[in-house]
Every structure is written in structure tokens, then in C-alpha cells.
Image (spheres, grey):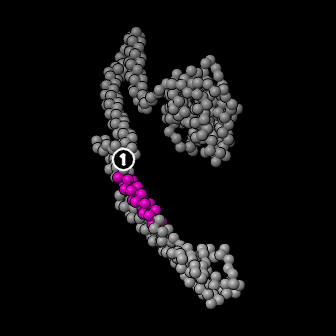
Amino acid sequence: MRAFRRLCIAVITVFLLLTAVLNIVLLRAKDNDNGNYRVEAKRLADEIAETGNYDLEKYPHITEVFTGDDLYRSDEHYLIIEADDMLYRVEYTVGNGQHGIAVVNCVLGALFLLMTGLLYYIKRHIIVPFGRLNHVPQELARGNLAVTIPEEKSRFFGKFTWGVNLLRESIEDSRKKEITMQRDKKLLLLSLSHDIKTPLSAIKLNAKALAKGLYKNEEKQRAAAESINTRADEIESFVSEITKAASEDFMSFEVTLGEAFLSSIITRIDARYAPQLAMSGTELAIQKYDDCILSCDPDRLSECLQNLVENAIKYGDGSQIKISFDKMDGCELITISNTGCRLEPKELPQIFESFHRGSNADKVQGNGLGLFICKRLMYLMGGEVYAEIRNGYFCVTLVVKLA
């Protein structure tokens, strides 16, 4: 608020100074203009004295010249000159400098009122409402989700406050879901760890008995071994449940299926990455394609393509990124390929797992989620994604259903 107040004072001060300077310039120009007719009258008298005639076209400020009986017949502005012992009445135009100054000042006054009104409007409808919202991001960052967000009817901040409220509610829901998930996982792990103790105790007892040779009968030895195997199967099932709980989807994906033209999706990708890749010297080659209507969530499909292009930028050699197209069994195949593939073919089955990073990612920052997200989103949209290495190109293909 103080900064805006200082800005307003500075703007008004500069405006008033400019107004004062402009008035000084206009007054000086007016004074110079008022003296011109006297100079022209003197020149006119000299011309009459030398030639006995005169030419008014030479004197823009003089309108008429009278002598004799017409010397005083007019009420216009005039002065009397003498030439060849005769008096001449010289009429001249009076400059409208005063009127011009008044007009200029009226215009400047109107601009001043408009400027102050605009500054007041900005203060009331933008600066003040924004000032009331200054503390909200800080409180949300601190975890205070109960912070009050003042309602604003202003068209500048109405949607903003509505969006901040939605953000707060989303953060609060996410926190509740996370707490619930953590509680459920904790209860599950405690329950499973307790359940594991029973078969583990049985395994230990049977193993000790076999080790000490307590079972002389071969049939009892076989039964003990089978019991150990059964209990081991139970533990294995419990471990599978623990692994499943630990690897549950930690990210929620929402997909809204609809229809979109392939051209609109590709145009969006081209507009986003073509300038960036051109600056880095990487060729973005988009092959020709037949436009068609895809059954997908346009935003989510664009997200998948963006993830693939980002991967191609990070893990390629910067020479070329190619987008190619094909059709098969009622689906559109969109393939993103890049040169400089350093991934081992044996690693292909694992690259779509969460947090998995290939051997080519040693010096590249990342979290191993890009391809995992692509796979989840394509599954939710009824499509598929797969990867392969062809002639030194790393290729990832999205299979999208046609509408």
C-alpha cells in the first residue's frame, strides 16, 4: 500500500511539473508572437518610404492598411505609422495565445482528473482487495487451512478468491485422505505383523525339531517339512499383502473421457516445444498424419505426450525428436522417438514401474514417474502404452482409441 501511495505521489508530481513547464513555454511563445506585428509594421513603413507601394503578402500579421479619410473608420486592432510624411493606419491580427493556453490547461485539468480517478479506482478495486489476501498464501504454506479468505465481489479478484478457496479445500481433502491412508496402512501392517508371528513360530518349532532329530519316523519328518512349507506359504501371502499395501497408488488420477481431434493435440505439443527445441538445436520432426477424432481426455493425453517429449529431451542426444503416426484395429498409434538411446533392451519391462530409473539416468535429474503416469492415464482412457528400441531410437507408443 505504501509503495502504491508513493507511486501516486510521484506520478501526480511529475504531471504537475510537466504542466508548469508547458505553461511557461506557451507564455513565452505568446509574448514572441505579440511582438511580430510591430516588426512587420516597421518593415512596411520602410517599404512605403523606399518604393511608395507595399505588398501585404509579405506581412502575415498585417491585415489592412488605410490612409487619409479612412484612417479611423474601423474598430480593429491597429497602430499608426508614418512614411513619407503621411500617416498610415495598420490593422493587425492579435494572436490567440491566451485562448490557446486556456484550452491546453482545460485539457490538462481533465487529464489530471481522469488520472487521479483511475489511480483511486486501482487502489479501491485492486490494491486494497489484494492487500486483504496477502497473508493467505503464507498461512496455507504454514499448514493453516482454517485461514479466513475474505469474499471479494470485484471482478478482478472474485475468481481468484474462489480459486484459492478451492485450493484450500483440495489441500484439506488431500490431507484427510493421506491421514486415513497412513492410518489404514499402519493398522494393516500391525495386523499382518501379528498374523505372521503364528506361522513363524510354527516354522521355528518344526525346524528345531528336525535339527535336533526329534522326529525319527520318516513320515513325521515329511509332515514337519510340509508344515514348514505351508507356514512359509502363509508368510509369503502376508508379505504379498504388505508389498501390495506399500505399493498402492500414491497418486490419484482423474480422467474425463471425451472426444478431441488429433490435430488439436499435436498442435498443442508443437506450440509448446517447437520454439524451445529450435533454440537448443534439436529437430522436432512431426510426420504427416490423417486428422481423426480420438476417444480420450484431451488434457490427459496432452500430459502423456508432454511427459514423453520431456523424457526424449532429457535422455536423448539432442539431435532429433520424432512424432510419427499409424492406425491399427480402430486405434491411433502416436509414437515419440528420440535419437541417442542408451537404455539396455532388458530394462524395457521395468521402465513403466513407479520410481524406476534406467541405467541411462545416472546424470539426469528425475523421479522415475513420467512413464508410470503415462501408463496409468492411458489405462484409464482405455488405451495402452509400450516402448521399444529400434535402430538406435528409443520409441514409446501411445495407443489411443478412435471415436
| Drawn side of residue 287 relative to residue 68, left or right | right
Q: Position of residue 248 (x, y in %)?
A: 42, 28
184 relative to 58, above or below: above
Mark 1 burial class by Cα count in 10 Å: few <14, some 14-19, many 20+: some
The answer, for residue 228, to whether it is visible in the render is: no
Which quadrant: the N terminus? Answer: bottom left
Which residue is situated farthest in the front direction here? 69
Residue 213 magenta? no
203 relative to 346, above or below: above
Choose between 42 and 268: the one closer to the eye. 42
Q: Position of residue 124 (x, y in %)?
A: 35, 52
Q: Residue at x 36, y 37 (%)?
A: 166
Choose between 174 and 168: the one closer to the eye. 168
Q: Residue at x 54, y 23 (%)?
A: 295
Q: Quadrant of residue 39?
A: bottom right
Count the labels in the image: 1
Choose between 347 and 140: the one closer to the eye. 140
146 relative to 234, above or below: below
Q: Position of residue 259 (x, y in %)?
A: 54, 25
154 relative to 188, above or below: below
Which span is picked out in magenta?
Answer: 104-124
The answer, for residue 277, to whether it is visible in the render is: yes
| Drawn side of residue 107 relative to residue 206, left or right | right
Q: Name the residue tied to disc 1.
A: 137
The amino acid type found where label 1 is placed reads Pro
Which residue is situated farthest in the top direction here? 219
| Drawn side of residue 54 relative to residue 251, left or right | right
Is the magenta region chiefly helix, strand or loop? helix
Residue 123 magenta? yes
Choose between 378 and 364: the one closer to the eye. 378
Element under label 1?
helix
Q: Residue at x 66, y 26 (%)?
A: 290
